[in-house]
Image (tube, rainbow, N blue to C red):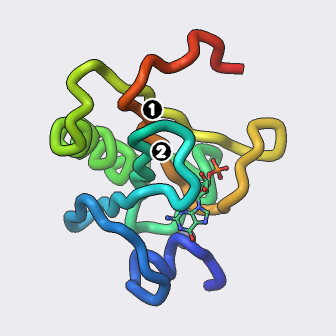
Amino acid sequence: MDCLFCKIIAGEIPSKKVYENEYVYAFHDINPQAPTHILVIPKKHLASTDEVSGENSIYVAKVFEAIPQIAAEAGLTGGYRVITNCGADACQSVGHLHFHVLGGKQLPENMG
Ligand code: 5GP
Ligand code: ZN
């Protein structure tokens, strides 16, 4: 499958890994939009939230179980924002479900 994030999980494309377990991989975004900008992704290829179902939602649960540890290790004591973009209107640019963890500054109140 020609998926950028599947290739990152497989180590075929380098990334700055911050966390990994059986279900989850997390790495620094190549174009950070905050002092800390980490992408947390399921190791199973799901195109977006549109493909989440009862069959695979354990991957989403595992992502959210990992996020507090990832945020703590990144020093995000003041809080952080978790965002996922789904589809064209949300400007999703990589077709592998991913959750942006943004922090390290006061984030803007407006989300869209
Ligand atoms: P989206 O716009 O789909 O919500 O987010 C995709 C994110 O992936 C963007 O923030 C973009 O900077 C990041 N990204 C795209 N290609 C790469 C890459 O090769 N490596 C890393 N680490 N991040 C990438
Ligand atoms: Zn993929």
Which quadrant of the figure has residue 72?
top left
Which quadrant of the figure has residue 14?
bottom left
Circle 2: residue type:
Phe
Query: Going by the picture, which residue comes out furthest to the top?
Result: 109
Circle 1: residue type:
Val
- Residue 94 in the image, given as x and y percentages of width and height: 66, 61
Picture residue at 58% right of the left edge, 44% below the top: 49
- Residue 32 in the image, given as x and y percentages of width and height: 53, 48
Residue receiving disc 2: 99
Quadrant that contains the N terminus: bottom right
Picture residue at 39% right of the left edge, 42% below the top: 36
Specify which label sits upstream in the sequence, 1 or 2. 1
* Above or below, 41 relative to 14: above
Of the pair 30 and 46, the residue shown nearer to us: 30
Picture residue at 57% right of the left edge, 16% below the top: 108
Density class for disc 2 (Cα within 10 Å; few <14, some 14-19, many ≥20) is many
Quadrant that contains the C terminus: top right
Residue receiving disc 1: 82
Which quadrant of the figure has residue 102?
top left
- Residue 77 in the image, given as x and y percentages of width and height: 21, 24
* Above or below, 11 relative to 97: below
Describe residue 17's horizontal placement relative to residue 90 as left or right. left
Answer whether labels 1 and 2 touch (C-beta < 8 Å).
Answer: yes
Density class for disc 1 (Cα within 10 Å; few <14, some 14-19, many ≥20) is some
Of the pair 43 and 94, the residue shown nearer to us: 94
Query: Going by the picture, which residue comes out furthest to the bottom?
Result: 12
Measure the C-alpha gap from mark 1 to mark 2. 6 Å
- Residue 45 in the image, given as x and y percentages of width and height: 51, 67
